[in-house]
Image (cartoon, rainbow, N blue to C red):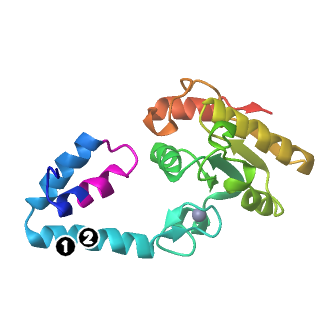
Amino acid sequence: MELYSGYINKLIDELASLPGIGEKSAQRLAFYIINMPRDRVARLANTLTEARDNVRYCRECFTLTDRECCPICENPHRNHRLIMVVENPRDLAAYEKTGKYEGVYHVLHGCISPMLGIGPGDIRLKELMVRLESDIEEVIIATNSSLEGETTAMYISKLVKPTGIRVTRIASGVPVGGDLENIDEVTLLRALEGRVEL
Ligand code: ZN
């Protein structure tokens, strides 16, 4: 027996397929949406489509942006010879919030995870190597301190070293397994300042 209408079930299924949303949250959201005024639902649906259609990857650093090149990469006052490698745009945002980092970024969109079958070819590593063909002084690896983050850091350092470019890793004041975005700014800055040569 169908507990709810087919439409509600469909909505719950769609919501539950999103990361971090379990069956219960999906039900709660679905009932909330059903009770929202029609114009708000239309606005939400429209916002989703608009975001999907207009957001793209920066052609330099691969963060998400509305333009061909993100505001950080376009900024002539940033140090374009200093590249910080992060796993995702949220980590970039965490470092940007400190307001103290002057270089640019490279967003990998994931990290190497043999367990999940994610290899070097599945993240934006090739694109990083292309960037290193220009005049780069230092690559700071700021992947998370999880097993996958460390594996990725080691892999990148092995790739970059032969180029003669300085490779550093942010200090591990960052709790093991902790996502960069959840760590406070002071800890982030300390990790950046205490970075070590690889
Ligand atoms: Zn960019």
Q: Which residue is mark 1?
A: 42
Question: Where is residue 148 shown, x and y percent of the image?
Answer: 65, 35
Residue pictured at 82% horizontal, 43% vertical: 166
Q: Is residue 35 magenta?
A: no
Q: Which mark is residue 45?
A: 2
On whether ligand 1 comes within 8 Å of the CB at mark 1, the answer is: no
Image quarter for ligand 1 equals bottom right
Q: Is residue 36 above or below residue 101?
A: below
- What is the secondary structure assignment of the residue under circle 2? helix
Residue pictured at 58% horizontal, 67% vertical: 58
Residue farthest front in this picture:
1
Residue pictured at 47% horizontal, 44% vertical: 94
Circle 2: residue type: Ala
Q: Is residue 184 left or right of residue 188?
A: left
Res. 170 in view: no
Q: Is residue 12 magenta?
A: yes
Q: Is residue 42 left or right of residue 155?
A: left
The quadrant in which residue 41 appears is bottom left
